[in-house]
Amino acid sequence: MNAFTLDRRAIMLSAVAGASSMLIPSLSGSGNANAQTASLLSGNAGRYRIRVGEISATVLSDGLIGGPPRVYASDAPEAELEEVLRRAFLPTDHMTLNLNTLLIETGGRRILIEAGAGKTMGPNGGRIFENLAAIGLGPADIDAIVISHTHPDHVGNLRTEDGSKAFPRATVFVPKADWDFFVRTDPDLSYMPVPEEFRVRFAAAIKNSLEPVMNDVEFYEAGAEIVPGLTTLVASGHTPGMATFLVHSGSDQLLLTADLAYHPVVNVDNPWLPGPDRDKETALASRRRIFDRAATDRIPVLGFHFPFPGLGRMLKTDGGYIWVPANWQF
Ligand SMILES: [Zn+2]
C-alpha cells in the first residue's frame, strides 16, 4: 500500500477561524501580511492525515512565513528569477513559505517533527495549537519533539509567552552541532543575506525559544534513530547539524526534507541555492544526495516549507529535479 492511505478524518474542514491579528513586526519584512492573514482566516484545513504503514501521521500547519524571493534563491539571475515566479503565478516581491510540522503516532507515543515558528518570524505563525486542538489534542499530549535544526521557524513554538515550556511533557531532540553553534556561542551569521538587525533578532529568537528546555534537551547526531520508525539522516550545510528524517513502517516510507529546499519552484524545479545555507557546497551535496534517494526509490516526500500539505515526489531529469505534488486524498 502506498504511504498516502486514506483517512476519512482528513476531510473534516477546520471550523476554527480565530486567527490572531496581533501586529508583531515581521522579521522577514513581509510585504503582503494582510493577504496572508486573510487567507488564514478563510477557514481551510490546516491538518492533513496520512499513513506510513502502521504509523498514523498528521501534517499540522503552523501557518506561514516568508520574505523576498531573492533570499531563497541567492544565485538566481534577477530576470530569470522574476520570469520563473511569474510563470508559476507567484508574486515577484514576496515568497510565502509554509510551516508543515508532522505529528506521528507510533509505539504509543506522539512525536512532533519540528515545533514550528510561533510568532518568531512574523504574525502568521503559531497556528499549530489550533490545529492540534482540531484533532482533539493539546500541547500536553505530545511526548517528544524532534527538531531538524534550530532556526527560529523550527523551534519558535517551544516557549510560551510567559517563558515556560509550551509542550510541558515533551522531550525535545536537537542536533548537537546546532546547539553548539547557535546556543553555546554567539554565532557569526554574516553569511545570511539579510540586514544585520534581522540577524541579531534571529540569533536571539533561537536562544529565547530554546531556553525553557535548556536543562533537559536530548542531543542527537544526524544519522541516529530517534524511535523505531523515525530515523534522522545527515543533511548538514544549511546549518552545521541539520538532519532530515525518514519515517518508515514495513515497506512504506516518508522522507522529510526539512530545509534542503524552501520552495519547490526555486530550489527543486530550479537549482538555486537558499541564501540562509551556511555552507552552500555542503548543503548542495546534501540536497543532491537526498533528492537522488527520493527520486530513485520514488519515496513520498514532505517539504517543511512547501505549499501545504507539502507532500509529493521528486522526479529526476537530465539537469536536475522536478517536484510533483501529491493529489489531495479524501
Ligand atoms: Zn525553515
Image (cartoon, helix red, strand yellow):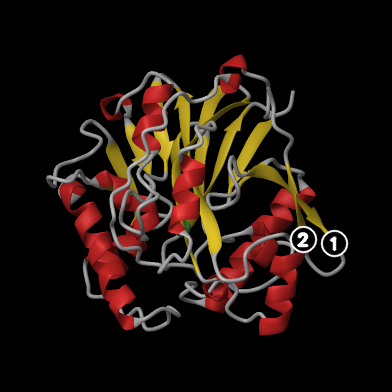
Residue 150 visible (yes or no):
no
Q: Relative to residue 313, is residue 74 depicted above or below?
A: below
Percent coordinates x, y for residue 96 in the rendering: 54, 58
Q: Is mark 2 within 8 Å of ligand 1?
A: no
Percent coordinates x, y for residue 168 in the rendering: 20, 33
Q: Answer left or right for 210 relative to 61.
A: left
For mark 1, give the secondary structure. Answer: loop
Q: Amino acid at mark 2?
A: Tyr
Residue at 23% x, 53% y is 210
Residue at 59% x, 40% y is 309
Crowding at dot 1, Cα within 10 Å, few <14 / some 14-19 / many 20+, comes out as few
Residue at 73% x, 60% y is 88
The residue to which callout 1 is attached is 317
For mark 2, give the secondary structure. Answer: strand
Residue 281 marker: none
Q: Nearer the viewer, residue 171 or 38?
A: 38
The answer to whether the residue labelled 2 contacts the one labelled 1, judged by CB atoms less than 8 Å apart, is: yes
Q: Relative to residue 272, is residue 249 depicted above or below?
A: above
Whole-angstrom CA distance, mark 2 to mark 1, is 5 Å
